[in-house]
């Protein structure tokens, strides 16, 4: 007779299920007196996204029970809020870490796939761990990625004025702007200018909110962030950005935790290419941070020609998108910081690195 299921859900076909332990620090689970949670991840064929829960695993009974506070289905937590699928993790015992490796499909036409002779690439490997507050997983590119960094450009304490008219500046000095690693910290100078979080959005997912309020919207706080893979005249550009909204008192009480603002992170590829027959959805996720004390939010974006892989809030929210510019390619691509909000935004620190190519070897 078949054994009782470890866990089940009415969510259609599961692909690439994964089950593993995590601890609250940057490491992996395994005992030794540390508090361990277990993660169950599934790639849902019906949605083409990856969802996860974490909870308690009873080894003796071989039973898994997700934490009660978590949604257990296709409205729950996700690894990545973009084009990221079919992932698996492995335990790196030498470096005491759990490594996540996922796949990203193409978003161009079938004819382009035939012309190339291949389809789909692996995303950058990510370290994964449970956030200190125990509410979600955190992700960050593995440290080895930094060995590919070359020429370095720094921007410090540069103010990007607000006013809603759309202000921006170029991050110049990069030799290979289509293959870059960018780490930036932004500081909102006037959070009082944040617009109210529309009650109608409470039941919507972040992607729907961002689709309604894209990169070209004129907001109170944001949109602000990066234009990547941008052409000289800015007619091709992909926006990776934040918008900040304020909650009313009832919503603060409902959500709990005292956070008075909602931070939305988006990838808007609507202007990414002149090419036709491309799939260009807006991707978005909420970032569970309290921006009020400092006004600061971090963003790391890795750009690799058609891949734009971003991490907000030090790894709390990840979004991967595929874009196919026709002019902003190779050394013709450019990188900008922009602000379309009423509030001024300061780039307190930005480091951009030209990236070399990874060497793939079969050596042990």
Image (spheres, rainbow, N blue to C red):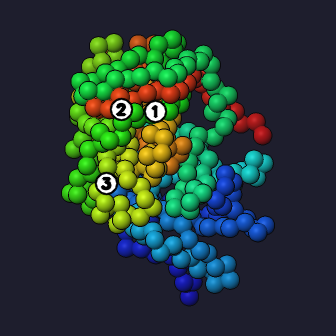
Q: Who comes first in sequence, dot 3 or dot 1?
A: 1
Q: How many residues crowd mark 1 within 10 Å: few (<14), some (14–19), many (20+)?
A: many
Residue name at image x 62 percent, y 67 percent? 37
Q: Nearer the viewer, mark 3 or mark 2?
A: 3
Residue 247, numbered circle: 3
Q: State the SS at label 1.
A: strand
Where does label 1 land, which residue?
186
Q: Who comes first in sequence, dot 3 or dot 2?
A: 2
Q: Who comes first in sequence, dot 1 or dot 2?
A: 1
Along the horizontal axis of the image, is 274 left or right of 65? Answer: left
Q: State the SS at label 2.
A: strand
Residue name at image x 64 percent, y 30 percent? 146
Q: Distance between the residues labelled 3 and 1?
A: 21 Å
The quadrant in which residue 31 appears is bottom right
Q: Nearer the viewer, residue 65 or 329?
A: 65
Quarter of the picture holding the N terminus = bottom right
Where does label 2 land, which residue?
224
Q: Is residue 80 above or below residue 146?
A: below
Residue 54 spot, x, y in % from top left: 54, 67
Q: Distance between the residues labelled 1 and 2?
A: 9 Å
Quarter of the picture holding the C terminus = top right
Residue name at image x 50 percent, y 33 percent? 185
- Asked if marks 1 and 2 touch (Cβ < 8 Å), the reply is yes
Residue 208 spot, x, y in % from top left: 26, 50
Along the horizontal axis of the image, is 353 left or right of 50? Answer: right
Q: How many residues crowd mark 3 within 10 Å: few (<14), some (14–19), many (20+)?
A: many
Q: State the SS at label 3.
A: loop
Q: Nearer the viewer, mark 3 or mark 1?
A: 3
Q: How many residues crowd mark 2 within 10 Å: few (<14), some (14–19), many (20+)?
A: many
Query: Can you name the residue that lies furthest to the bottom here?
Result: 1
Along the horizontal axis of the image, is 165 left or right of 231? Answer: left
């Amino acid at each position: 007779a078949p054994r009782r299921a470890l866990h089940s859900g009415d969510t259609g076909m599961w692909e690439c299920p994964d089950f593993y332990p995590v601890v609250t620090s940057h490491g992996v689970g395994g005992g030794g007196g540390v508090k361990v949670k277990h993660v169950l991840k599934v790639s849902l064929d019906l949605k083409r996204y990856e969802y996860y829960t974490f909870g308690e695993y009873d080894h003796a009974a071989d039973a898994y029970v997700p934490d009660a506070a978590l949604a257990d289905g296709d409205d729950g937590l996700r690894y990545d809020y973009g084009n990221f699928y079919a992932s698996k993790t492995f335990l790196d015992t030498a470096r005491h870490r759990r490594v996540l490796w996922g796949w990203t499909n193409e978003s161009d036409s079938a004819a382009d796939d035939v012309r190339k002779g291949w389809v789909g690439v692996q995303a950058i490997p990510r370290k994964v761990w449970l956030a200190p507050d125990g509410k979600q997983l955190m992700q960050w590119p593995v440290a080895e990625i930094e060995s590919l960094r070359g020429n370095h450009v720094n921007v410090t304490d540069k103010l990007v004025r607000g006013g809603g008219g759309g202000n921006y500046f170029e991050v110049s000095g990069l030799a290979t702007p289509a293959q870059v690693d960018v780490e930036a910290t932004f500081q909102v100078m006037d959070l009082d200018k944040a617009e109210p979080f529309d009650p109608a959005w409470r039941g919507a997912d972040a992607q729907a909110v961002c689709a309604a309020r894209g990169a070209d919207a004129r907001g109170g706080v944001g949109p602000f962030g990066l234009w990547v893979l941008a052409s000289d005249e800015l007619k091709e550009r992909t926006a990776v950005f934040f918008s900040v909204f304020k909650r009313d008192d009832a919503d603060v009480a409902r959500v709990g935790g005292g956070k008075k603002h909602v931070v939305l992170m988006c990838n808007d590829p609507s202007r990414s290419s002149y090419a036709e027959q491309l799939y260009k959805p807006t991707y978005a996720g909420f970032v569970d941070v309290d921006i009020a004390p400092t006004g600061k939010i971090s963003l790391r974006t890795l750009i690799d020609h058609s891949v734009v892989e971003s991490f907000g809030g030090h790894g709390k929210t990840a979004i991967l998108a595929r874009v196919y510019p026709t002019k902003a390619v190779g050394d013709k691509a450019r990188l900008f910081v922009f602000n379309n909000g009423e509030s001024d935004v300061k780039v307190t620190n930005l480091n951009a690195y030209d990236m070399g190519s990874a060497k793939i070897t079969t050596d042990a």
